[in-house]
Amino acid sequence: MHTIKTITDYLESIAPLNLQESYDNAGLIVGNPTTKVTGILTTLDCTETIIEEAVEKGCNLVVAHHPIVFRGLKKFNGANYVERTIIKAIQEGVAIYAIHTNLDNVRNRGVNAKIAEVLGLTNLEILSPKNEEGTVGSGMVGELPDPLSEEVFLRHLKAQMKTGTIKHTELAGQPVAKVAICGGAGGFLLDRAKAVGADVFVTSDYKYHEFFDADGEIIICDIGHYESEQFTTQLLAELLTEKFPTFAVLCTERNTNPVRYFV
C-alpha cells in the first residue's frame, strides 16, 4: 500500500512546490506523510462535505486544487468553514493535500493545458513564461482548429466549459482564431493576452471597471472561477490513475461552487 509521501512525491514531480506563487500554500496541509493511503478523492475545493464524502468512499487522502488553509490560523474552534473542515479531517483521519499555483504554472498536464484541451486549442504556448524554455509560467494561448464567429465561439465556450452564463465585453464583429486562457483569477494577464494577439481572453473574477481595460482590442470572457477550473478535479484523477492504475482514485461527486445563478 502506498504512503501519502509516495503520492505527493509523484504530484510534486509534475508540479514542484517551488513553482507555486509566493502567496500560496500548496503542499500537505493535514496528515502524516508516512500514513498508508486507502484511497484518494480529488476535488477543486476541500470543504466539510468533501471530508464526509471521502469517509463514505473509504478515502483517507483528499487532493484538492485550492488550499483549505490560505492564511495563518491562530485558533481551531470551529468558528468558520476552514476550521470546521480541518477539525473534521483530523477527527476522521483524512489527510489534505493542495496542488495549486504550482499546477497552474506548468505547461504540460497543468490546469491551463486541461482547459485548452477541453476547448480544442492547438499550437499551445505559455502566455506569460517564467523561464527561457517556456515550460513554466502563467496562463496559456492557443489557436482554434478553424476561426469561429464571436457568437459561435461563445456558444462553444459555454457548452465546453459547462457554464450557465458568460460575462463578456463588447463584440467586435471579427472572427475568433487565437484564444488566451487562465484558470481562476487571470486579470493580471490581460496585457500579455493583447501583446500575443489573442482575439479572446477567457478567465474569471473580473471586476466591473476592469472590463473597460479590453479597450476594443480584445474580448474578455469571464466564465466564473469554479467553472474555469472545474476540470482540474478530472485532471488530478487522470494524473494519479496513470501512475497508480490499480489504486482507488475517485473524483468528487459534490459541487463545491459557493456561487449560485438565478436565470
Image (spheres, helix red, strand yellow):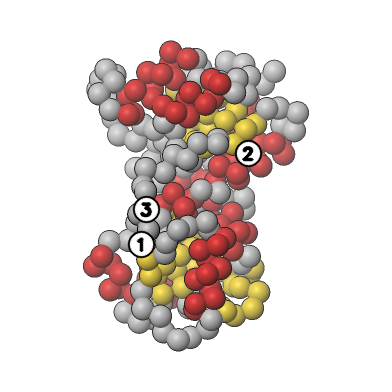
The x and y percentages for residue 35 are 57, 15
Assign the C terminus to one quadrant of the image: bottom left
Q: List the single residue furthest toward the front.
A: 263
Residue type (three-letter) at the residue carrying disc 1: Gly
CB atoms of marks 1 and 2 within 8 Å: no
> Any mark on residue 4, and which?
none
Which residue is more in the foreground, 75 or 81?
Answer: 81
> Any mark on residue 261, and which?
3
Residue occupying image coordinates x 49% and y 71%: 154
Assign the N terminus to one quadrant of the image: top right
Give the mark nearer the N terminus: 1 vs 2: 1
Q: What is the number of callouts on the image?
A: 3
Q: Secondary structure at mark 1?
A: helix
Residue 7, by quadrant, is: top right
The x and y percentages for residue 10 are 63, 34
Q: Secondary structure at mark 2?
A: helix
Residue type (three-letter) at the residue carrying disc 2: Ala
